[in-house]
Image (tube, coloured by chain):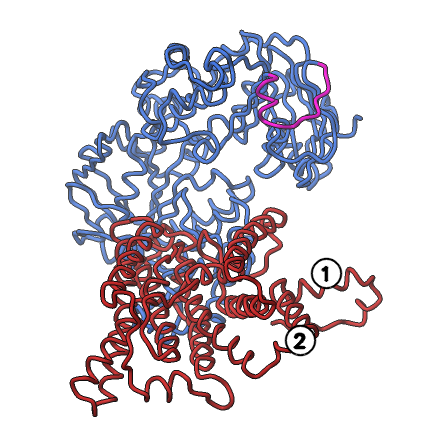
Chain colours: A blue, B red
Amino acid sequence: MFPAPAPSRGGGRFTEAVNSMNEHDGNLLELTGISKRFPGVLALDNVDFDLRHGEVHVLFGENGAGKSTLINVIAGTFGPDSGRFLYQGREIRKLTPHQARVMGISPVFQEFSLVPEMTVDENLFLGRERSRFTFLNKRAMRAKAREVIAELGFNLDPTRKVGSLSRAHQQMVEIAKALLTDVRLLILDEPTASLTEAETIKLFALIDRLRAQGVGIIYVSHRMGEIKQIADRISVLRDGRKIATVRSDEISETELVELMAGRKIEVLFPHVDHRPAEDLLEVRNLTLASGSVKDVTFHARAGEITGIAGLVGCGKSELIRAVFGLDPVESGTVLLYGKETSSFKPTAMLRAGVCYFPSDRVAEGLALARPVRENVSMAALDLPEFAKGQVIRRKEEKKTIQDIVDRLKLRPPQIEPAVGRLSGGNRQKVVLGRGLAREIRVFLFDEPTVGIDVGAKLEVYELMKLLLEMGAAIVLVSSELPEVLHLSNRLYVMHHARMVAELTGQDINEQAVLACFFREDAPNAGSDEVPAERAVASAA
Amino acid sequence: MTTVAIEPASVAQPKLALVSRALRRIGFLPALLIVLIVLLVLFEPRFMGMFNIFNVARNSSALLIVASGQMLVLVVGGFDLSVGAVIALTSVVTAKVMAVMLEGAPEDVTLAIIAGVAAGMGCGFVTGLINGACVAFLRISPFMVTLGTSSIATGVALLLTNGIPVYGMPDAFVKDFGRAIWFGLPMPVYVSLSILVLVWIMQRRTTVGRYIHAIGGNVQAAMVSGVNTNFYLILAYTLCGMLASLTSLLLTARLGSGQATMSGNLMLESIAAGVIAGVSLRGGVGRVEMVALSALFLSILTNAMNLLKVNSKIQTIFMGIIVVAAVALDELAKRRSRSAREG
């Protein structure tokens, strides 16, 4: 009934890992001429890549440039069509994910390889359980899990079910899992995307420690700041080809972006003319049933971008989700165009001209298998322009959607391909197109540029600008501080479910926002820098 | 795990709170089971009759064995609609093989029994293997695969018998095994309890159990973690098929004939037992001890309806309602408190 156990590896502590620096003076990893073709795309085109012992090598590039394909090849998810793969001086063929892990290649992907129904320690040891004759040694595993988690400085309970953890904590489990055994090559795919500042600092300290031990680290990120902070070398990919590998201290941010985009990008943030007019949306004393938003008051005016900044998990996303009717409201009022609304339902909100754009475009925004056309018109089919009774007016639909797609500069500018075949930036444009398909006056953006590249970001910002000129009110919720700092006319700051400040004009700067984040921990810090701030939460 | 300890502090609390607290401790299903039994004992004297108790024990044993197999498949995120057909096919094949062997060599009873049992178990093994392989390698939806194999197995069983019961099994198999009473209880009770213990150990204490749960929870994660997902998928379906065959052997031995119409409602009941026991239809969650309780519950419920002379057609309708209600309740409870679930 029970098959023989797979030989279980006694995973040493990750701190004991890798003393092979002197064994091989050569590179830890050396890829030559790697190509990989997927149906319809050449994802990697003759790419060379190498990783030394004890270095952080950043992979940089737009979405669809081939970064994920490359790290998947290295992690053994799929093999390359051609090219040489040398690891620790040995040529590797037909690598499987399991083999890769056994050899010390540990990937931490954005798509978590965790089982939500299982506990943290069960997940950590998945596939390498401590066992005797297939009987599990649970106590040993739990003790080991505690030890590793403590060593990482993470605040994690090994007995909790992974599905009940926040994304940030799941990320920590994923990292802990990667470090449980002898790791020689660590792959981190945008690891900070869901971590808070404090956790990011811990992660970087950990990366430094691993680097000192000779672990080679491949780090994928879009965030310029952290790239400059931790990278030793940077490889830039574009359209499946490697453009350049440069030392991090020899290149400026601007040069890096130019390499990536293949064109000159003068400004990251366009200049936005705010012409604040009447209040379109007003939220008073809103409290959510989940408790993630407490007594929040804010308003958004036509012709300006109202930013909401805050750390991950502060409740800013839940706030606008609730306004659109996606998260249940406990108390409070929402006024649209000066009139109180009582029906918090997406259908009613759309009819009233309010549209929400989710941050998780794949899970909440798009039907990937359906064409662009259907995805864009999805939220507007109740309008007479699109349907007569229940019958869709195909010709009008095509015309209107093509028009929108052209305005969004979708690439390719076609309306029939399935959305699943588009890159991240283009998918975001499709979601945004929905706001153009019907008359929308209040745009609620939830992390609109997360996971999309610089070029596409700029286009999203340009679109916002266009919307403002058309007299829309934009609410921009973002964890990316530079984004809200540069684009907002007024900037609200949320902290621990409450609105703690409203900043305007000169007060919109990094120090002021950060001061709001950390004020509770250090009551005296930062009070001088933000004289004009206004406590909104307490104002009834 | 299901002990109720009422601390002195809680006695002072209002009665309702106490009840709901106790209910949470014991769990909804055991509480329901207790209520059902108490009602039957109080109001239906025939329930406690020796014959009736044996009947319930036999029925729930059969259901428990099929349902624990079904649970394994549900846990890997699948479905096995073919268990009913496997039961029918096993019954027919076992009886036929034994009868033919005895005809040729009437004195070789042991050999005939061994051959018959092996052939019967082989039916479940092969069907399960085919189911698992199609799901694992061809990535066909479990629903379609098992619906197909179910049709095939039923067809073969009917073809072999033309729908006529197969007689001629040795007495050693029927009287001495199938209808045996060991230590005051019908033999199937011991078989099913052994299966319960074995599956429990496998689930809780072995890597096999852990991998089966991991695959149901997140196939991708299991694969990346180096779990041979195809092997464990096939294993789950194969075990399910073999457990269905085992059930069939017990039923066939008791009836004394191989019948192509043997399974009755067992396929639906096995899924119902799983769902009522809180096995997730999305995979990853399920405990065999709860499945055992739920099998017992369904058997007693059916028995109660029989005692109350509820029309058998209405019973079928009732079973359907219970399945849908159980899934709906599970879904509602999940929505109300996502994090309050205990593992």
Residue A349 located within the stretch drawn in magenta: yes
Q: Residue at x 29, y 20 (%)?
A: A262
The answer to which of A32 and B137 lies nearer the viewer is B137
Q: Which residues are magenta?
A: A338-352
Question: Label 2 to label 1, Cα distance in Å?
Answer: 24 Å
Q: Position of residue B273 (x, y in %)?
A: 50, 62
The answer to which of B44 and A324 lies nearer the viewer is B44
Q: Position of residue A7 (x, y in %)?
A: 30, 69
Q: Residue at x 29, y 82 (%)?
A: B169
Q: Chain of mark 2?
A: B
Q: Is residue B253 visible?
A: yes
Above or below for B38 versus B329: below
| Residues at discs 2 and 1 in contact (Cβ within 8 Å) | no
The answer to which of A523 and A400 lies nearer the viewer is A400
Q: Residue at x 66, y 74 (%)?
A: B44
Q: Residues within 10 Å of mark 1 (few under 14, many from 20)?
A: few
The tag on residue A20 is: none
**Foreground tag (2 vs 1):** 2
Circle 2: residue type: Val
Q: Position of residue A11 (x, y in %)?
A: 37, 64
Element type at mark 1: helix
Mark 2 sits on what residue?
Answer: B41
Mark 1 sits on what residue?
Answer: B20
